[in-house]
Amino acid sequence: MNTLRRFVALCGLCSSCLAASGDAPARSDATFSIAFGSCGHQDHPLPIFNDVVKHRPDVFVFLGDNIYGDTDDMAVLRQKYRQLGSKPSYKNLKAHTEILATWDDHDYGRNDAGKDYPHKAGAKEAFLDFFEEPADSSRRDHEGIYHSVYRRVGDKTVQIILLDGRTFRDDLQRYGDQTDRPKRYFYNLDYAPHADPSKTLLGEQQWAWLAEELRQPADFRVIATGTQFGIEYNGYEAWANFPHERERMVRLITETQANRVLFISGDVHYAEISKFEQPGCYPLYDLTASGLSQTWKFATPNRNRIEGPIMDNHFGLLTVDFTAGHAHAKAEIWDIRGNQRVEHTIPFAEISFAGD
Ligand SMILES: [Fe+2]
């Protein structure tokens, strides 16, 4: 429960005074809810944030393309952040909900950019300043913006890991000649999977940090990544372009025996849930919510897709319920018209190693 709602509950005030609508579902103290989304253009009014507030999540996670910066001029980048920050809907979100963020390419500064983007240090400062990262935060002391937070729910701990898929990422490999493209891809493929295992997405420094994070005690872990983790290769940018890095993630989760890890991702301008299954590990779910204001014309083939695609503007909502006896996570997608488009329940037992 977020601090403001807890305060209001203690005061005995009507909690509906906090939100534009009283239609939020009843919640128990054993739950923690994470709203999430990506790809909102600063030129758009972004009314979706008002819908997020109605659900009264404990936290909102921005998954990247939080603005469309696309510039080498850091003054322009900061101005675009100010444009986002001045929106009434964003102010409403900020007033009622804790905000966490990672970035993707467009707010990093350039489409599909990686470690060679020349202004990444300046872009990091602009990002951290806008999202009000404290001056003494460890996030300001290392290269990149990876970070983790821990939130208590009764005697349980939720860990939210924010990955940086830009600062250390090697160049993508161009797909090239389309004449040998498999028939199921009805569009031009931008990138091919890397065959060279030295090519990295997270970089060694971030991998070492992540290994330590996964060894910290937590009862539920959410890993936020700008690009999709669990989809099948589709020729666009995703973890599937670094298959050895995705295998490394599975290996790390298996080695650390980190239970109840679930991914949230953005980037593609539609919503879907992917279920990535690998031997020796429980299924790794990837909840994609991408389209705070952006849309895309089509969804790519994805054999791992179990829900969606949702092509309308939307946000995601993950509710973690620790209630003894039926502990589970509920994944939802809500569209801009207030419709629940996806509801998918994942029992804790399904995303735990045997014996836990
Ligand atoms: Fe985007």
Image (cartoon, rainbow, N blue to C red):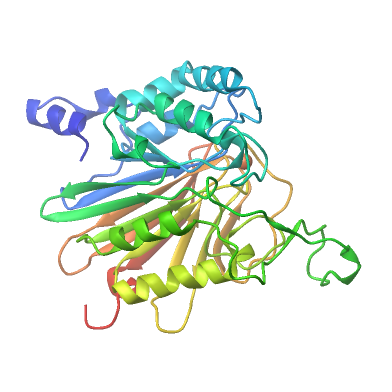
Q: How many marks?
A: 0
Q: Which of the 4 image quadrants contains residue 9?
A: top left
Say which of 72 and 223 sits in front: 72
User: Percent position (x, y) of residue 131?
Assistant: 39, 28
Q: Which of the 4 image quadrants contains residue 177?
A: bottom right
Q: Which of the 4 image quadrants contains residue 50?
A: top left
The answer, for residue 20, to whether it is visible in the render is no
Q: Quadrant of ligand 1?
A: top right
The answer, for residue 100, to whether it is visible in the render is yes
User: Percent position (x, y) of residue 211?
Assistant: 34, 63
Quarter of the rendering occupied by the C terminus: bottom left
292 is higher (above) or lower (below) than 189:
above
Quarter of the rendering occupied by the N terminus: top left
Residue at 22% x, 60% y is 216
User: Percent position (x, y) of residue 147?
Assistant: 35, 45
Residue at 33% x, 36% y is 23
Say which of 252 and 142 sits in front: 142
61 is higher (above) or lower (below) than 94:
below
Q: Residue furthest right?
A: 179
Q: State left or right for residue 87 relative to residue 213.
A: right
Say which of 109 and 282 sits in front: 109
Q: State left or right for residue 335 relative to residue 223.
A: right
Q: State left or right for residue 15 relative to residue 234.
A: left
345 is higher (above) or lower (below) than 111:
below
Residue at 64% x, 63% y is 241
Q: State left or right for residue 78 relative to residue 16.
A: right
User: Percent position (x, y) of residue 6?
Assistant: 15, 34
